[in-house]
Amino acid sequence: MKKLLISAILLLGSFSMASAELGVKIGVSGNMGEFTATGSESENGVVSTSAGEEDASMLGAMGSVFGEVNLGFLPGPLSRISIGYDMVVHEIKTGTATNSRGDPGGGTGAAGGDLRGKDNGNNIRFTADNAVSATIDNINTAYVLVNLTDWLYVRGGIIEADINTTEDLDTGSTYGNTSVDGTVFGAGVSFTTESGFFMRAEYNDTSLDGVTLTSETNSDNKVTLSGIDGETARLSVGKSF
């Protein structure tokens, strides 16, 4: 995605004769919405939930800065196209997911450590208490915006983010960090003053691809994120130059 953005900037720079017709906009945005992640965990090749996958939803808010260049030198309706780049200026922390998994027959953790024993009537029930959380960082989006009218527009692009995991697992497993890609599509309305200040209200649908992480201590243990989907409302203010 970053190579795509650099290529686009170099391409635009080659149009020196048309540079005066490029409209530049910069602004800030606030986003709020609900995101749902779907995934599963497997230990020693066995998925550890009866349903196979679990869903987790959370409300989230984030702030970003963006810049756009309007391709006003293009003919006809193509002059309504702008390309932009949006960057979230902070990391997003997820909640902590916890569970306690039991083994009536006893057992050991993935790294060889004994699991905790609890007296469950006549038998000893061995349990593993697990807690996992994550931060999502470096959320960047390259997008194309098309003005359908002077006040109505649609926007679509590709998004990239880093997921950094933190875990406290009695099973002994540890998981590394990863990056995910996805898409964002939205539609909104815009109002611009004579002095070039503008305001936008926008609805977005975001979808991030899935990924599978393998335990760094036991290659038979895996966590699979099938995907993250979200719907957000976005408010932006900025200035045209």
Image (cartoon, helix red, strand yellow):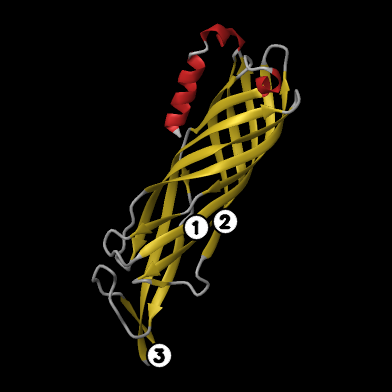
CB-based contact (under 8 Å), mark 3 and mark 2: no
* Disc number lying in front (3 or 2): 2
* Disc number lying in front (1 or 2): 1
Residue occupied by mark 1: 226
For this rendering, which residue is in front, 208 or 171?
A: 208
Give residue 82's quadrant in the image: top right
Above or below residue 105? Residue 139 is above
CB-based contact (under 8 Å), mark 3 and mark 1: no
- Residue 43 position, x and y percent, is 36, 70
Q: Is residue 34 visible?
A: no
Give the distance between the C-alpha atoms of the residues marked 3 and 1, in whole angstroms. Answer: 39 Å
**Residue type of the residue flagged with mark 1:** Ser
Give residue 3's quadrant in the image: top left
Q: Residue furthest front?
A: 75
- Look at the numbered disc 1 and give the secondary structure of its residue: strand
Query: Residue visible at 46% across and 60% down?
Result: 97
Above or below residue 17? Residue 225 is below
Earlier-in-chain disc, 3 versus 2: 2
Query: Residue visible at 35% across and 60% down?
Result: 168
For residue 165, side relative to residue 226 (left or right): left
Residue occupied by mark 2: 57
Residue occupied by mark 3: 121
